Image (cartoon, rainbow, N blue to C red):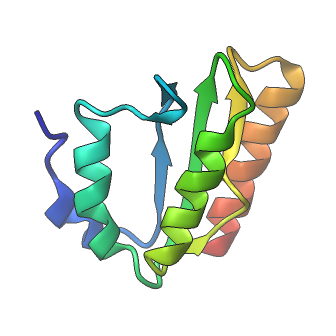
Amino acid sequence: ESFGGVERLKEYDGLMFGCPAMGDEVLEEGAFEPFFAEAESHLRGVPVALFGSYGWGGGAWIESWAERTRNAGAKLIGDGLAIENAPDDDGIAACEALGREFAASL
């Protein structure tokens, strides 16, 4: 089942996407991956920030997601924020900093 609403993406000045790493460090495949695959065609020139969490591996999924987003022509804010498990104080500060940087880009 899709998240829906991809056609509404053009209504926004910028977009933040969040998704955890799943399986072999990939985006959640049931709903998010199909949604993002459709959204990619709407990202050219748009400020985009990416964030998510992972529980194993080194967070390589965020690097490939960031590259994919750049290749779609988005103005990627930061390099994608990956937090291992739940955010600690430093992780929360990194999330807040990403939010501020994203807001400043609009």
Residue visible at 54% across and 32% down? Answer: 25
Q: Is residue 50 left or right of residue 43?
A: right
Counting labels gives 0
Can residue 81 be seen in the rendering of this structure?
yes
Q: Residue furthest front?
A: 24
Dividing the picture into quadrants, the one containing residue 13 is bottom left
Residue at 20% in and 59% down: 6
In the image, taking residue 99 as reference, residue 106 lies left or right, namely left
Residue sitting at x 62%, y 24%: 54
Please state, as top left, top right, bottom left or bottom right, where the C terminus lies in the image: bottom right
| Image side of residue 32 versus residue 38, left or right | right
Quarter of the image for the N terminus: give it: top left
The residue drawn where x is 30% and y is 34% is 29
Work out whether 57 lies above or below 2: above
Above or below residue 21? Residue 102 is below
Please provide percent x and percent y for residue 55. Answer: 64, 16
Q: Quadrant of residue 40?
A: bottom left
Q: Nearer the viewer, residue 88 or 24?
A: 24
Question: Residue 4, relative to residue 89: is it above or below?
Answer: below
